[in-house]
Image (cartoon, grey):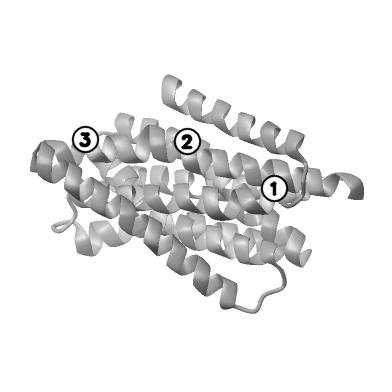
């Protein structure tokens, strides 16, 4: 069977995180670094909230409603959304106890963990969609690429400005992105008989709860500490513009 095309589509979508990470090669005057960090954090938070409420949660909930019926579908969606909230609160508590270079570094690592959880089912969905119909798979991959780029920013920027290491920032972004094609390969080789649209939807609702909570309780408070509200609004606005493009044009 032909799997090269679907695997390539999934890989390109996943590695878009590295494209986002390339912003660390932009040079800023020292007085503008904090402004850039705030814009980047707010932009990433907007993407996480926006992609969850316009895509992950509604589309996945619809699948559950169709599969389980209205009552069970709503209950399952609610349960896994709440589980996502508690999971990220638990992960954040663990990160707070970890000795690290700075809070920014912890935030970058937390973003990486969350996006690994996010990208695994996305890799499966992109691969399976492309495997069944390459045209649909490509459209899905374009949408995923659009939000994987700012997700790469959300990992690379905090880690780079905490460590001053471009290599470290790029490596962590690559690790998050490479999970998509790895997820696709594992799914195809070992899990294809167990993976259903309902299972992928349940995982993505869980991810929606994780990302909304991460954005509101962790990323935005970090950005607010800099007290640069104009740049916070700028980053948030740019993020939601990208979400609108993704929602209405793809």
Element type at mark 2: helix
> Where residue 209 sits: x, y (%)?
38, 50
Position of 107 compared to 208: left or right? right
Residue at 60 percent across and 55 percent down: it is: 155
Marker disc for residue 50: 2
The first of marks 1 and 3 along the sequence is 3
To which residue does mark 3 refer? 62
Which sits in the foreground, 213 or 4?
213
**Element on which disc 3 rests:** helix
Q: Position of residue 55 (x, y in %)?
A: 37, 35
Residue 111: x, y in percent? 54, 58
Give the residue at x 26% y 58%.
187
**Residue behind mark 1:** 224
Q: CA distance from mark 2 to mark 3?
A: 18 Å
Name the one closer to the observer, 39 or 224: 224
Tag 1 and tag 3, C-beta contact below 8 Å? no
Quadrant in which residue 190 is drawn: bottom left
The residue lying furthest to the top in this view is 249
Task: Please tell me which of labels 2 and 3 falls first in the chain.
Answer: 2
Query: On screen, 61 above or below 101?
Result: above
Q: Is residue 110 above or below residue 10?
A: below
The C terminus lies in quadrant:
top left
Front residue of 165/2: it is 165
């Amino acid at each position: 069977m032909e799997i090269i095309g679907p695997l390539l589509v999934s890989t390109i979508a996943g590695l878009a995180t590295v494209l986002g990470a390339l912003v660390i090669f932009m040079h800023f005057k020292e007085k503008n670094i904090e402004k850039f960090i705030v814009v980047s954090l707010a932009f990433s938070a907007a993407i996480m909230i926006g992609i969850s409420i316009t895509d992950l949660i509604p589309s996945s909930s619809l699948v559950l409603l169709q599969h389980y019926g209205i009552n069970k579908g709503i209950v399952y969606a609610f349960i896994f959304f709440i589980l996502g909230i508690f999971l990220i609160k638990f992960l954040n508590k663990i990160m707070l106890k970890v000795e690290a270079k700075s809070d920014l570094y912890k935030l970058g690592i937390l973003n990486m963990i969350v996006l690994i959880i996010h990208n695994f089912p996305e890799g499966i969905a992109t691969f399976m969609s492309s495997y069944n119909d390459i045209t649909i798979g490509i459209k899905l991959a374009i949408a995923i690429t659009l939000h994987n780029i700012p997700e790469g920013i959300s990992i690379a920027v905090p880690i780079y400005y905490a460590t001053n290491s471009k290599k470290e920032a790029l490596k962590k972004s690559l690790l998050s992105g490479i999970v998509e094609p790895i997820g696709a390969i594992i799914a195809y080789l070992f899990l294809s008989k167990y993976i259903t649209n309902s299972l992928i939807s349940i995982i993505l609702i869980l991810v929606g709860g994780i990302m909304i909570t991460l954005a509101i309780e962790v990323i935005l408070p970090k950005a607010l500490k800099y007290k640069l509200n104009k740049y916070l609004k700028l980053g948030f606005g740019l993020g939601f513009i990208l979400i609108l493009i993704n929602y209405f044009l793809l």
